[in-house]
Amino acid sequence: MKESIRQNLIDAGCDDVFIEQFDTCSGDIKLCEKMLAAHRRELLDEIHNKERCISCLDYLVFMMKKEDFL
């Protein structure tokens, strides 16, 4: 595997196991694309979960201000 590809995977948050699996599928572009798409979905799920947490905090602050708690 090219070092630039390995570094890109590291920068994208892929762990050593993922990188090793990705390296073994390098002859099968479709499998590599599926792996990358799955990792992308996982990252998006993490983002969406954090957004929900932020929304909950924003709502709490809103309600506290509305009730003159702050």
Image (tube, helix red, strand yellow):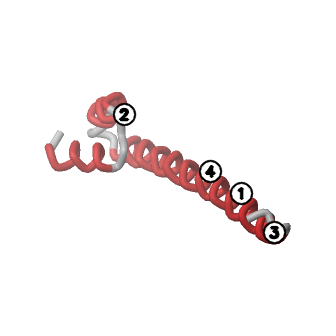
Amino acid bearing label 2: Phe
Which label was assigned to residue 49?
4
Residue behind mark 2: 18
Which is nearer the N-term, disc 4 or disc 1? Answer: 4
Q: CA distance from mark 3 to mark 4?
A: 29 Å
Q: Is residue 35 above or below residue 51?
A: above
For the residue pair 51 and 15, the one nearer the viewer reads as 51
Which label was assigned to residue 68?
3
Which label was assigned to residue 56?
1
Amino acid bearing label 4: Asn
For the residue pair 26 and 59, the one nearer the viewer reads as 59
Identify the residue at horizontal 21%, vertical 46% (top origin): 7
Q: Is residue 60 above or below residue 1?
A: below
- Left or right: 15 in relation to 3: right
* Residue 3 occupies quadrant: top left
Decide: few, some or many residues near mark 1? Use Cα within 10 Å; few <14, some 14-19, many ≥20: few
Q: CA distance from mark 4 to mark 1?
A: 11 Å
Return the x and y of residue 11 as percentages of the image width and height: 29, 49
Which is nearer the N-term, disc 1 or disc 3? Answer: 1
Q: CA distance from mark 3 to mark 2?
A: 50 Å
Return the x and y of residue 12 as percentages of the image width and height: 34, 49
Quadrant (top left/top right/bottom left/bottom right) for the N terminus: top left
Identify the residue at horizontal 36%, vertical 40% (top origin): 14
